[in-house]
Image (cartoon, rainbow, N blue to C red):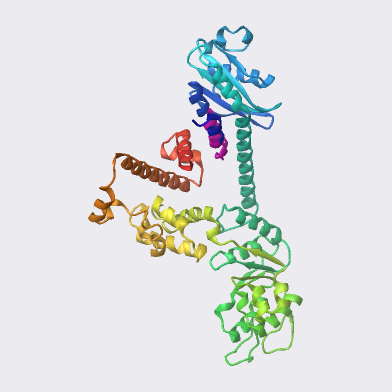
C-alpha cells in the first residue's frame, strides 16, 4: 500500500497554482481524517490570507468564520497544533470568540511550518466530538512541514506570475507596440530590449525567419524613439533589381540615366529625421553595399548623376532572415557593413518556439477576420493549430485563420476549414468512429471485453474533457476564474478537472 504522505507529496509537487495547491492539500487531509469542513490560509508577506475552503466560508461574516479565525490565530501565534474534541466545552479555549459555533464537533488546526517559520495553517472540523483519531492527528502533523513548503512555493510562484503580468501590462502601457501580440517570455524580453534600444541612435539588425514580424519590431523601434515624428520609410531590398535598388536608395538627378526625366530623392533622403527600414538587407549587391556603408558611417548620400554629397540624418534598421555572418564568410556581404548595421542585434523567435502565442494570435485573427459575426475556434481546430510547426510563422497563421473564416458559415470554425497541411495533423487520432469503414469498426471493437470497453470509454471521456478544458482556457486567455464563470462550473470543479488531466 502506498504511503499517503508520499502520495500527497507527489500530488503537491505537480501543482503550480497557489489555490489549486491549497485545494489538493485540504481535500486530501479531509479525505484521510474524515473531516467534513475546513480551510487553508497561507502567508502573503506579513499577513495570512485564505487560499481555499470546503463547506466553510473563511472570509465571511458569520459566526463560524469568526470562530475559525480565532483558532487559526491561536495556532499560528504559538506555532502549535490546536486540537479540541469539543471546543465549546474546552477550558483551554476559554475566551476565544464564538465557541458555541463548534458545539458537538471536533476541531484540528495545524500550522504549516518548518522550524519556527510559519507558512500558513490548515483548519479541519469533524462532524462528531472527539472524531479525530491519534493516527489522523499524527498524519496531519507529518504532512504540515512539506505541505507548508509546497504551499509557500506555489504562493511565491503565483506572486511572481502576478508581478510578471503587471510588468507586462506596464511595458505595453508605457510603450507603443501596435500590432505585436504576445505573452511569450522570450518575446516579452525582446520587447523590453526594444524599449531600451529605441531611444538610441545606433543602427539595429533585426533577424528572424520570414513571417515573424521583423517590420513590426522596426516600427516599434521608430515609434518609441525621439524620431517618431519623422517618417518611417521601408524598402524591400529583394524586390528590386540592382540597377533600380541603387536609385531607390540614393536617388538620382534628371538625366542620370534613360528615363530619369526629373530629380528624385532616394529612400535615405526621404527618411531624413526618421527611420529607414531595409528589409532583406542580405540581398543588396556588393557594389551597392559599398555606397550604403558610407551612408551609414558618415550620414552622406550621393544621388546618381552627381558628385555632390548630401548629408542626411537617418537611423538605419536592417532586417534579414539570412545568416549574415555566413554571408560575410562567403564573401557575399561586406564585413565592415555587417558590423555597422549590427550595433545592436534583435533576434525574433519563430512561432513554433512560442507555443503559448499560437492560441492568443489565433483568437485575435478570428476576431479580426470574422468581425461581422460571433465566431470561435473549435477545440479540435485549436489543437491542430497548436500542433503545427508554422514554417511561415505568424504570417502563415494569419492566412490560415483568414481562410478558415471565409470558408466557415456557422459560429464555430472547425478543423475542416483549416489548410490541408494543418488538417492532417493527428488525423488518425481525431478520426471519429462514425467515419471508419464498417469492417474496421467490427475488427476494432468485437475483440473488447467489459474491462477493455471501460478503459476505452474512460479514455474517450478524458479526451473530451481535455478538449473542453483546453478550448475554454484558450478562449479566456488562461484565466481560470473567467473560464469557470463562462462555463457554468465552480472554480474548484474546473481546477479539479485540470489537475486530473495533468495526472
What segment carries the magenta color? 10-26
Q: Position of residue 489 (x, y in %)?
A: 42, 36
Q: Residue at x 58, y 53 (%)?
A: 184
Q: Quadrant of residue 267?
A: bottom right
Task: Specify whether 358 is left or right of 174.
Answer: left
Q: Position of residue 179 (x, y in %)?
A: 55, 59
Task: Specify whether 497 is left or right of 144.
Answer: left
Q: Residue at x 50, y 47 (%)?
A: 477
Residue 12 falls within the magenta-colored stretch? yes
Q: Quadrant of residue 461?
A: top left
Name the magenta segment's main secondary structure. helix
Q: Nearer the viewer, residue 53 or 484?
A: 53
Q: Position of residue 242 (x, y in %)?
A: 60, 85
Q: Residue furthest front?
A: 1
Residue 185 lies, with reference to residue 40, above or below; the image says below
Q: Residue at x 67, y 73 (%)?
A: 325
Q: Position of residue 113 (x, y in %)?
A: 66, 27
Q: Residue at x 60, y 33 (%)?
A: 151
Q: Is residue 499 visible?
A: yes
Q: Is residue 375 visible?
A: no
Q: Nearer the viewer, residue 176 or 28?
A: 28
Residue 469 lies, with reference to residue 174, above or below; the image says above
Amino acid at each position: 500500500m502506498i504511503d499517503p504522505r508520499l502520495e500527497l507529496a507527489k500530488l503537491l509537487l505537480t501543482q503550480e497554482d497557489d489555490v489549486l495547491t491549497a485545494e489538493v492539500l485540504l481535500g486530501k487531509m479531509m479525505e484521510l481524517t474524515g473531516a467534513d469542513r475546513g480551510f487553508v490560509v497561507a502567508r502573503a508577506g506579513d499577513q495570512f490570507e485564505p487560499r481555499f475552503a470546503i463547506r466553510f466560508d473563511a472570509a465571511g461574516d458569520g459566526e463560524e468564520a469568526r470562530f475559525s479565525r480565532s483558532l487559526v490565530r491561536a495556532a499560528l501565534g504559538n506555532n502549535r497544533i490546536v486540537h479540541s474534541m469539543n471546543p465549546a466545552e474546552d477550558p483551554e479555549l476559554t475566551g476565544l470568540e464564538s465557541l458555541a459555533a463548534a458545539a458537538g464537533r471536533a476541531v484540528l488546526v495545524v500550522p504549516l511550518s518548518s522550524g519556527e517559520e510559519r507558512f500558513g495553517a490548515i483548519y479541519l472540523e469533524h462532524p462528531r466530538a472527539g472524531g479525530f483519531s491519534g493516527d489522523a492527528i499524527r498524519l496531519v502533523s507529518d504532512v504540515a512541514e512539506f505541505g507548508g513548503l509546497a504551499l509557500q512555493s506555489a504562493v511565491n510562484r503565483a506572486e511572481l506570475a502576478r508581478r510578471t503580468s503587471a510588468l507586462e501590462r506596464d511595458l505595453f502601457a508605457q510603450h507603443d507596440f501596435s500590432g505585436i501580440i504576445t505573452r511569450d517570455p522570450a518575446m516579452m524580453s525582446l520587447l523590453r530590449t526594444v524599449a531600451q534600444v529605441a531611444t538610441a541612435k545606433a543602427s539595429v539588425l533585426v533577424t528572424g525567419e520570414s513571417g515573424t514580424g521583423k517590420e513590426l519590431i522596426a516600427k516599434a523601434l521608430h515609434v518609441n524613439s525621439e524620431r517618431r515624428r519623422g517618417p518611417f520609410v521601408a524598402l524591400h531590398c529583394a524586390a528590386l533589381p540592382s540597377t533600380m535598388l541603387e536609385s531607390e536608395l540614393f536617388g538620382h538627378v534628371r538625366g542620370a540615366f534613360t528615363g530619369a526625366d526629373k530629380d528624385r530623392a532616394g529612400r535615405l533622403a526621404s527618411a531624413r529625421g526618421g527611420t529607414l527600414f531595409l528589409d532583406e538587407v542580405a540581398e543588396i549587391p556588393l557594389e551597392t553595399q559599398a555606397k550604403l556603408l558610407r551612408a551609414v558611417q558618415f550620414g552622406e548620400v550621393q544621388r546618381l548623376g552627381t558628385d555632390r554629397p548630401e548629408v542626411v540624418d537617418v537611423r538605419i534598421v536592417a532586417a534579414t532572415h539570412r545568416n549574415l555572418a555566413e554571408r560575410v564568410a562567403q564573401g557575399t556581404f561586406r564585413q565592415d557593413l555587417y558590423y555597422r548595421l549590427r550595433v545592436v542585434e534583435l533576434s525574433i523567435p519563430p512561432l513554433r518556439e512560442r507555443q503559448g502565442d499560437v492560441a492568443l494570435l489565433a483568437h485575435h485573427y478570428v476576431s479580426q477576420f470574422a468581425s461581422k459575426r460571433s465566431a470561435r475556434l473549435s477545440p479540435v481546430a485549436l489543437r491542430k493549430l497548436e500542433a503545427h510547426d508554422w514554417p511561415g510563422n505568424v504570417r502563415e497563421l494569419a492566412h490560415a485563420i483568414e481562410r478558415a473564416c471565409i470558408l466557415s458559415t456557422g459560429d464555430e470554425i472547425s478543423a475542416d476549414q483549416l489548410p490541408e497541411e494543418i488538417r492532417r495533423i493527428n488525423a488518425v487520432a481525431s478520426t471519429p468512429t462514425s467515419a471508419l469503414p464498417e469492417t474496421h469498426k467490427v475488427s476494432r471493437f468485437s475483440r473488447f471485453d467489459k474491462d477493455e470497453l471501460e478503459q476505452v470509454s474512460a479514455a474517450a471521456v478524458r479526451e473530451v474533457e481535455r478538449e473542453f478544458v483546453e478550448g475554454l482556457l484558450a478562449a479566456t486567455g488562461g484565466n481560470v476564474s473567467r473560464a469557470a464563470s463562462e462555463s457554468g462550473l465552480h472554480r474548484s470543479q474546473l481546477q479539479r478537472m485540470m489537475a486530473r488531466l495533468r495526472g
